[in-house]
Amino acid sequence: MDTLIFAGLLATWYALVRERSRAGAVVGWWLAALASVGLFAYLISGNLSMGLTF
């Protein structure tokens, strides 16, 4: 998940450096954020189904 977050931040930085549209950078950031939340929810639900607690 750390790699996914880093890739999203790197893509956003690249879009800003290349002076792409601000909307493109924001969309890239939101895609990375939603993918991270989805992955985290998947990991939590899988661990809970195995009887693990947090």
Image: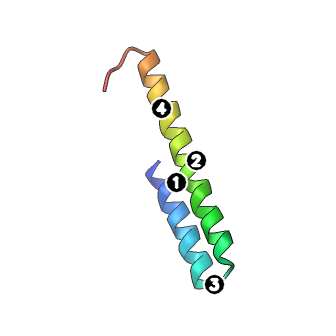
**Above-or-below relation of 54 to 38:** above
Under circle 4, the secondary element is helix
Real-space CA distance between mark 1 and mark 3, rounded to the nearest whole angstrom: 21 Å
Q: Which of marks 2 and 4 is nearer the N terminus?
A: 2
Which three-letter amino acid code belongs to the residue tagged 1? Leu
Q: Whole-Å distance between the Cαs marked 1 and 2?
A: 8 Å
Residue 5 at what x, y percent from top left?
Answer: 49, 56
Q: Mark 4 points at which residue?
A: 43
In the rendered image, the vertical position of residue 21 relative to residue 28, given as above or below? below
Instruction: Find residue 17 and report its horizontal and vertical position in percent.
Output: 57, 84
How far, Cα to Cα, is label 4 from label 3? 35 Å
Amino acid marked by disc 4: Leu
Disc 1, disc 3: CB below 8 Å? Answer: no
The picture places residue 19, in percent across and down from the top left corner, at 64, 85
Residue ID for mark 1: 4
Are circles 4 and 3 on residues that touch, CB within 8 Å? no
Residue at mark 1 to residue at mark 4: CA–CA distance: 14 Å
Q: Residue at x 58, y 69 (%)?
A: 11
| Labels 1 & 2 near each other (Cβ < 8 A) | yes
- At 46% from the left edge and 16% from the top edge, which residue is drawn? 49
Q: Nearer the viewer, mark 1 or mark 2?
A: 2
Quadrant containing the C terminus in the rendered view: top left
